[in-house]
Image (tube, rainbow, N blue to C red):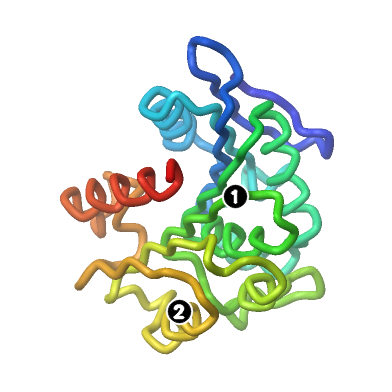
Amino acid sequence: MRIELPSGTAAELVHPPSGPAGRGLVVIPDVMGMRPLFDDLVARLAAETAWSVAAFELYPGREHLEVADRLAAASTLDDDRVLGDASAAADATGSNVVSILGFCMGGMYALKAVDGGRFERSCPFYGMVHVPEAWRGPGQGEPLDALAAGDPESVLAVIGTADAWTPPDHVEDLEAAGATVLRYEGADHGFVHDASRPAHRADDAADAWRRVLDWLAG
């Protein structure tokens, strides 16, 4: 069901049939934000795990923007607002223990969410380890600074080795900071969450989901 977070940001929230679960999960979408793909993902994850699952829009009030405009506007995003919405989405699940995952830009924010201790575990899928130069702005902090302020051992990152957004030296920086990395050889950006993308790799995606959900349940 669609809900509104205290900031006014739209979110999708699904509980298992029994109602709010003891364990919850927040999903941060890719740069294109909330759309049927993520409504379906939230519902599927809630059904498969029996957890309460919520996802929210990265660009509230600017949902009409196309991908090029969203990328161009990335420098205007503010960590306090995005991570505040992530925390509010966690509260909306009503769960005692909440983890977080995200994709692409959402994966970058899943890394940043490690600071503060709100989330038990974090699983960024191909999230940027360093803020891209074009995205830097006054409200954008560095993911590795957030890891240093939190618990980097709470991170399991999913990375494709052919992904230009997460080059090998950045991934090495992530591991050096204490995170665990799952590498998928030859996989490109976005290979897990959207089956319509040319980069999608069904076998690798299934393996990544199995390993991530096992990690989150552990």
Residue on which disc 1 sits: 120
Identify the residue shown where x is 55% and y is 38%.
Answer: 25
Q: Is residue 179 left or right of residue 73?
A: left
Quadrant assignment for the C terminus: top left
Q: Position of residue 22 (x, y in %)?
A: 58, 27
- Find the residue positioned furthest to the top: 18
Given residues 177 and 89, the one toward you in this image is 177
User: In the picture shown, does residue 66 fall above or below 23?
Assistant: below
Task: Give the percent coordinates (x, y) of residue 81.
Answer: 79, 53
Q: Position of residue 154 (x, y in %)?
A: 54, 60
Q: Earlier in the sequence, mark 2 or mark 1?
A: 1
> In the image, 60: left or right of 80?
left
The secondary structure type at the circle numbered 2 is: helix
Q: As displayed, is residue 170 above or below residue 36?
A: below
Would you identify the image quadrant in which residue 12 lies?
top right
What kind of residue is marked 1?
A: Glu
Mark 2 sits on what residue? 175
Name the mark on residue 95: none
Q: Name the residue rendered at 51%, 52% in the picture.
A: 102
What amino acid does circle 2 point to? Glu
Above or below, 199 against 52 in this view is: below
Could you tell me how far apart the alpha carbons at marks 2 and 1 are, in whole angstroms? 19 Å
Q: Dot 1, crowdedness within 10 Å: few (<14), some or many (≥20)?
A: some
Is residue 38 visible in the rendered image? The answer is yes
Local secondary structure at mark 1: loop
